[in-house]
C-alpha cells in the first residue's frame, strides 16, 4: 500500500509537471503568434486602402508568406463604427486533446489592440485574438508519450515490486502463524528453510528458540510430574499414618472409655465422663477420616477411579443442598495409570471447590470418558454459575494448579466462561500419561 501510494504520488507530480510545462508553452506560443500577426497587420494596413479587406489581406500575406499556416487567430480592423473581419487563416481540424487536458493547459484569453494609421491618414483599431486550440493540440501530442511513459513505468514498477516483495515477504505469514502456535503452547512448530537471507536467519533463530522452549517445557513437565508424584506419595504416607496411628489410638481411647464406664457404673460422674470421652473420640475420628480422604481417597486405591469420583460427588451433594452435581462415566476407566487417576480426581476436587467458593451455581455436571481406542481420557466439568473474566483468572491458584496438573499429564485444557454464562472446563490427557 505504501509503495502504491508512492507511485501514485510520483505519477501525479509528473502529470502536474507536464501540464504546467505545456500550459506555459501554449501561453507563450499563443502570445508570440498574436504579436507577430499584430505587427504584420499594422504594416499591411498602413499601405492599404481604408475599408478594402482584400487588399489588406493580400498585403498581410506578402509581409508573411507562411501566415496561412499561422495558429488560430481572430483578426479584425475597426474603422469608426465598422468592423472588418479578416479570415486570414482557416481553422484547423478539431484537436484530439482530451477535454481535461485542454481545460488544464488553457491559458487566459489573449487579445491585443493597437491603433494604426493608413497611407491616407485614416485611423483604425486593429484587434488580434489568439485561439490556443492548435497549440493545445501540439502540446498534447508532445505530452501524451511522456504521460503514457510515466503511467506505464508506475504501473509496471508497482506491479513488479508487488509481486517480488509479496513473494519475499510471503513467509512472514508463516512466521506469524508459527509464533501464534508457540503462544498457544504448540512448541513443536517449526519454520522451513526460507530463500530470503534475512528471513532465513529469522527462521533459524525461531526454530532454535522453539527447540529450547520445547526442551524447557518438557523438563518443567517432568519436574511438575515428579513433584506431584512426590506430593501424592507424601499424602498417601500421611493418610496411612493417620489411619494406623491416630485411628488405633482413638480406638484405644474409646475402649478405655467403655471400660471406665463399665467399671464405674455406680458412679454417675465417671459414667458421664466416659461417655463424653467416647463422643469426643468419635468426633476426632470423624475429623481424621475427613483429613485422610482429602489427603488420599481410600476408595481410589481400593475400588478404583470411578467409585472414588462417585464418593466425591455424593459427598459434595450432601454438603451443598442448594446445588446438585451429576456424574457421568463412560468407557473403560478401571485400568488407568495411577498418575492419571489421582490427577483427574484432584482436578475434579479443585473444580468442585471453586464452584462452592465462586460460582454460585445450582447445576454442575462432571463427564469423564475414555476414548474408543483407549488412548486418551476426556474430562468435562460444567456449571451454570456466575462465570468470570478469563484474563483476570490467570492469577488464581486453583486454575493455575489445574493447568499444572494437566501439563504434567501431557494433556490439553480448554476453558470457556464469561460473566453470567457459567464455566466449562474440558481436559484431555493420554491414558498412559504416568509412564513418561
Image (cartoon, rainbow, N blue to C red):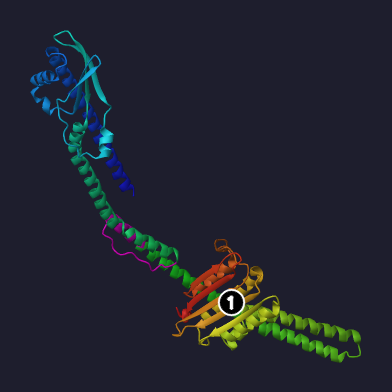
Eyeballing the image, is 410 above or below 163?
A: below
Q: Is residue 315 left or right of residue 166?
A: right
Name the residue nearer the viewer: 426 or 56. 56
Q: Quadrant of residue 287?
A: bottom right
Q: Is residue 398 left or right of residue 77?
A: right
- The residue shown at (58%, 74%) is 382
Q: How many numbered marks appear?
A: 1
> Crowding near pointer 1: few (<14 within 10 Å), some, many (20+)?
many
Q: Which residue is mark 1?
A: 348
Name the residue nearer the viewer: 18 or 100. 100
Image quarter in which the C terminus is found: bottom left
Element under disc 1: helix
Image spot of residue 312 (x, y percent): 63, 81
- The residue shown at (13%, 13%) is 49
Name the residue nearer the viewer: 7 or 302. 7
- The residue shown at (63%, 84%) is 311
Q: Which residues are magenta?
A: 185-206
User: Could one spot residue 341 in this view of the protein?
Assistant: no
Q: Is residue 188 magenta?
A: yes
Eyeballing the image, is 353 above or below 131?
A: below
Q: Quadrant of residue 13?
A: top left
User: Could one spot residue 26 in this view of the protein?
Assistant: yes
Q: Is residue 205 left or right of residue 46?
A: right
Image spot of residue 157 (x, y percent): 24, 48
Image spot of residue 65 (x, y percent): 8, 23
Image spot of residue 428 (x, y percent): 49, 76
- The residue shown at (24%, 35%) is 18
Q: Is residue 261 magenta?
A: no
Amino acid at each position: 500500500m505504501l509503495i502504491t501510494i508512492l507511485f501514485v504520488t510520483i505519477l501525479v507530480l509528473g502529470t502536474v509537471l507536464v501540464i504546467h510545462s505545456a500550459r506555459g508553452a501554449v501561453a507563450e506560443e499563443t502570445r508570440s503568434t498574436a504579436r507577430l500577426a499584430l505587427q504584420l497587420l499594422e504594416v499591411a494596413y498602413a499601405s492599404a486602402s481604408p475599408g478594402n479587406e482584400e487588399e489588406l489581406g493580400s498585403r498581410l500575406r506578402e509581409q508573411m508568406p507562411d501566415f496561412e499556416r499561422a495558429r488560430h487567430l481572430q483578426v479584425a480592423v475597426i474603422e469608426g463604427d465598422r468592423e472588418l473581419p479578416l479570415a486570414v487563416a482557416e481553422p484547423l481540424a478539431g484537436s484530439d486533446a482530451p477535454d481535461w487536458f485542454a481545460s488544464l493547459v488553457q491559458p487566459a484569453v489573449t487579445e491585443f489592440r493597437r491603433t494604426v494609421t493608413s497611407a491616407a491618414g485614416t485611423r483604425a483599431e486593429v484587434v488580434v485574438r489568439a485561439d490556443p486550440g492548435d497549440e493545445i493540440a501540439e502540446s498534447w501530442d508532445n505530452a501524451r508519450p511522456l504521460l503514457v511513459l510515466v503511467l506505464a513505468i508506475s504501473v509496471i514498477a508497482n506491479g513488479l515490486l508487488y509481486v517480488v516483495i509479496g513473494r519475499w515477504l510471503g513467509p512472514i505469514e508463516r512466521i506469524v502463524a508459527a509464533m501464534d502456535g508457540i503462544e498457544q503452547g504448540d512448541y513443536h512448530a517449526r519454520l522451513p528453510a526460507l530463500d530470503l537471507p534475512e528471513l532465513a536467519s529469522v527462521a533459524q533463530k525461531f526454530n532454535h528458540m522453539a527447540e529450547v522452549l520445547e526442551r524447557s517445557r518438557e523438563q518443567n513437565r517432568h519436574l511438575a510430574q515428579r513433584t506431584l508424584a512426590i506430593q501424592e506419595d507424601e499424602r498417601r504416607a500421611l493418610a496411612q499414618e493417620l489411619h494406623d496411628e491416630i485411628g488405633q489410638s482413638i480406638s484405644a481411647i474409646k475402649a478405655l472409655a467403655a471400660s471406665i464406664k463399665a467399671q464405674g457404673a455406680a458412679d454417675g460422674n465417671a459414667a458421664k465422663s466416659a461417655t463424653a470421652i467416647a463422643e469426643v473420640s468419635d468426633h476426632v475420628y470423624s475429623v481424621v477420616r475427613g483429613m485422610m480422604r482429602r489427603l488420599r481417597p481410600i476408595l481410589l486405591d481400593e475400588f478404583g477411579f470411578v467409585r472414588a469420583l462417585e464418593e466425591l460427588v455424593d459427598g459434595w451433594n450432601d454438603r451443598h443442598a442448594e446445588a446438585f452435581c451429576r456424574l457421568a462415566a463412560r468407557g473403560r476407566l478401571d485400568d488407568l495409570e495411577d498418575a492419571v487417576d489421582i490427577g483427574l480426581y484432584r482436578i475434579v476436587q479443585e473444580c468442585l471447590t471453586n464452584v462452592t467458593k465462586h460460582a454460585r451455581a445450582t447445576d454442575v455436571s462432571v463427564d469423564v470418558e475414555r476414548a474408543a481406542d483407549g488412548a486418551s481420557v476426556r474430562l468435562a466439568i460444567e456449571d451454570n454459575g456466575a462465570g468470570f473474566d478469563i484474563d483476570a483468572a490467570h492469577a488464581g491458584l486453583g486454575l493455575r494448579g489445574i493447568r499444572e496438573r494437566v501439563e504434567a499429564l501431557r494433556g490439553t485444557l480448554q476453558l470457556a466462561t464469561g460473566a453470567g454464562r457459567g464455566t466449562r472446563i474440558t481436559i484431555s490427557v493420554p491414558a498412559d500419561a504416568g509412564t513418561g
